[in-house]
Image (cartoon, rainbow, N blue to C red):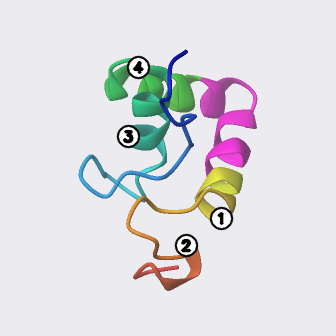
Amino acid sequence: MNSTSPRTLTRSTTDRKISGVSGGLAAYLGIDPLLVRIGFVVTALTSGVGLIAYLAMMMLVPSDDGVPASALPGT
């Protein structure tokens, strides 16, 4: 049996452009963060869902350093 812990979705503090949502989601999925960022931009421009999803994740997904989203500068 494998004794690895389950993956958890967190916002990245090391691969952060705005709030670390794309970096954290990319690490969780095991893909390039640029692809996630492009996905958010495309869906934000076409339907607005990308912006809503990004903002929701920014508020709901914890940071990988334990700092809540409300403590981020500028929020």
Earlier residue among tags 1 and 3? 3
Q: Which mark is residue 37?
A: none
Dots 4, 3 in contact, CB < 8 A: no
Q: CA distance from mark 4 to mark 3?
A: 10 Å
Identify the residue shown where x is 71% and y is 54%.
56
Residue 51 horizontal side relative to residue 71, left or right:
right
Classify mark 1: helix, strand or loop.
helix
Identify the residue shown where x is 50% and y is 19%.
2
Q: Amino acid at mark 3?
A: Gly
The rendered magenta stretch, by its main secondary structure, is classed as helix
Residue 57 horizontal side relative to residue 69, left or right:
right
- Which residue carries the number 4 mark? 30
22 inside magenta stretch = no
Q: Position of residue 49 (x, y in %)?
A: 75, 35
Q: Amino acid at mark 2?
A: Ala
Rendered-image quadrant of the N terminus: top right
Q: Position of residue 4 (x, y in %)?
A: 48, 30
Q: CA distance from mark 2 to mark 4?
A: 23 Å
- Which residue carries the number 1 mark? 59
Q: Amino acid at mark 1?
A: Met
| Badge 3: residue crowd in 10 Å (few <14, some 14–19, many ≥20) | many
Q: Amino acid at mark 4?
A: Gly
Dots 2, 1 in contact, CB < 8 A: yes
- Which residue carries the number 2 mark? 69
- Which residue carries the number 3 mark? 23
Classify mark 3: helix, strand or loop.
helix
Q: Position of residue 61 (x, y in %)?
A: 62, 56
Range of magenta residues = 43-54
Look at discs 2 and 4 and give the one toward the viewer.
4
